[in-house]
Amino acid sequence: MNRPDLLSFTVAGVTCAIPLSAVRQVTSMVALSPDTGRHPGAAGSMNLHGRAVPVYSARVLLGLPDRPLHPAEALIIVTSGRDCAALRVDRVRGVQESEVPPGESGVLVAGDGTVLIRDLRAFLAGDASGLSPLQPAAEEEVSPDNGRAGAILAERARILAQPEEEPHRTALSEILTFRLGAREYAVETRYVREAFIVREITPVPGVPDFIVGICAVRGEIVSIVDFARLFSLPEQGLTDLNRVIVLSDGAMTFGILADYITDIGTTPTGDLAPIEPGATPIAGRYLLGAAEGSRIVLDAAALLADPGMVICETPR
């Protein structure tokens, strides 16, 4: 069976999952513009950095009871080719690896009861055919918008609508969290092009030992950097469970090795705390701060600006 990374979430107490490779980012719920069409499951639209993105209710698409918008909900922004859409869910649980049976079925229920959504395009089009009626769990009633919730959603929408190139250090930022040794690190997802289980890496002679080799990624040859070697972190050894996280800023691209991916979510970048001395051997110029106590957020822009992270095609 295939064992891809999946992003797990819940709606009405039902656990669901979609391929992490299809996820662009995760953000908190925002105020939505009303839907003018009759698309099944359409909940409205959101302004994502100046781009109108349709939003679909996972509850409705799965035949579960809908409810009013709530600030505790989340939006999973997914991509399919050039198309971009958002899936409204109750809560994002995190990243997991799961066995996915072969086949082309768009939506199925795994042995543990998780609803696996494999064909996002078909699912967003309202095709959950073959799926037996789901039984929602008992949940607390969400009271109608009391004004304060609406103000929170509107402010989040305002922040998310601002141009991507304008830095807003107090805004919510999406981060991908991964483990290296005994500690969790994170990078902003806007610098993450994709993540995949480690595959064949070709060693290259004459390069620094922290560059484990090169790998073909969608027709492009990228360097693979081992942060454990580069920053003298505890090494776990390379196994077929390791992940490669491909970072890119448009000008520079390379992959980093991670033991595994643990989460994807949002954090207020303006609330990052200083990193305690001795918490990590990684140089300060590569660090943004600590999120929620223990997660160390790396400065992906600084890493990508370091020419030592890639293999040069010509002698230095």
Image (cartoon, rainbow, N blue to C red):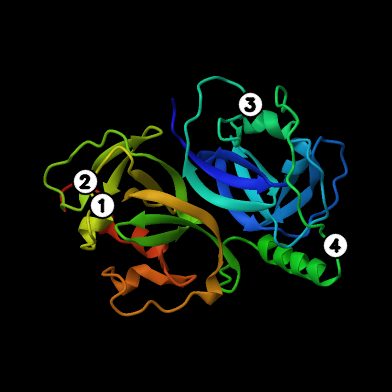
N-terminal-most mark, 4 or 3: 3
Q: Position of residue 197 (x, y in %)?
A: 37, 38
In the image, residue 283 sits, relative to residue 65, either above or below, namely below
Task: Name the element at disc 3.
Answer: loop
Disc 1 designates what residue? 226
For the residue pair 9 and 33, the one nearer the viewer reads as: 9
Disc 3 designates what residue? 106
Position of 100 compared to 11: left or right? Answer: left
Q: Residues within 10 Å of mark 4 (few under 14, many from 20)?
A: few
Q: Marks 4 and 2: in contact by CB < 8 Å?
A: no
Eye-nearest disc, 4 or 3: 4
For this orientation, the residue located farthest to the front is 138
Amino acid, disc 3: Gly
Mark 2 vs mark 4, CA separation in Å: 54 Å
N-terminal-most mark, 3 or 1: 3
Q: Quadrant of the C terminus?
A: bottom left
For the question of whether residue 247 can be seen, the reply is: no
N-terminal-most mark, 2 or 3: 3
Amino acid, disc 1: Asp
Mark 2 vs mark 3, CA separation in Å: 37 Å
Q: Residues within 10 Å of mark 2 (few under 14, many from 20)?
A: many
Eye-nearest disc, 3 or 1: 3
N-terminal-most mark, 2 or 1: 2
Q: Quadrant of residue 113?
A: top right
For the residue pair 78 and 161, the one nearer the viewer reads as: 78
